[in-house]
Image: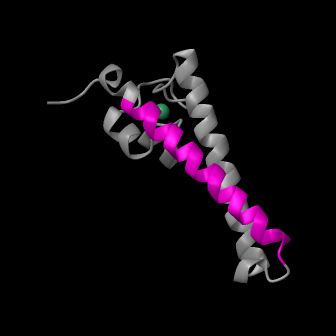
Amino acid sequence: MTHTLHDRTETLRELLERQFQRHTDQLTELMVYSRQRDHGGHDPDTLRRMIEAARQGIADTAQALRRMAEGTYGNCEGCGGEIPTARLEILPSTPYCVPCQQRR
Ligand SMILES: [Zn+2]
């Protein structure tokens, strides 16, 4: 049995909220490291990349939550088609269907 997006919205919202929290915690921790003399034991370039990835994660997740609030969540930003629910369950913050993602 396949679930429709409507059935899954609450679960996906929880996933997104958890993801948002996790990226925020990560960024907070990384910012603490970046102020330490030894960068928390990380190489400065690696730390910069990790901070960038955490910021990107926060931005992507926040945008997905905004799309959910606006009722456009699950529509591909590339082709306007529906993103399969199975894909959203794996990657809840993605704004693209698989073909559009691959074209980018
Ligand atoms: Zn698409």
Examine the rendered structure and indicate whether residue 57 appears above or below residue 4: below
Q: Quadrant of residue 33?
A: bottom right
Outermost residue, left side: 1
Q: How is the image coloured?
A: one colour
Residue 36 image point, x, y percent: 82, 75
Q: Residue at x 14, y 30 (%)?
A: 1
Q: Position of residue 37 (x, y in %)?
A: 85, 81
Residue occupying the far top of the picture: 71
Q: Residue at x 55, y 32 (%)?
A: 78
All told, the count of numbered labels is 0
> Percent x, y for residue 41?
71, 83
Magenta-drawn segment? 11-36
- Rendered residue at 41%/31% (across/down): 83
Residue 24 is covered by the magenta coloring = yes
Q: Is residue 3 magenta?
A: no
Nearest the viewer among 41 and 100 is: 41
Give how far across and how far down residue 29 sits, in percent: 69, 63
Compared across the picture, whether 44 is left or right of 97 comes to right
Q: Residue 93: in sight, yes or no?
A: no
Q: Specify the principal SS of the magenta part.
A: helix
Q: Is residue 40 visible?
A: yes
**Seen in the image, is 67 located left or right of residue 31?**
left
Q: Residue at x 34, y 24 (%)?
A: 5
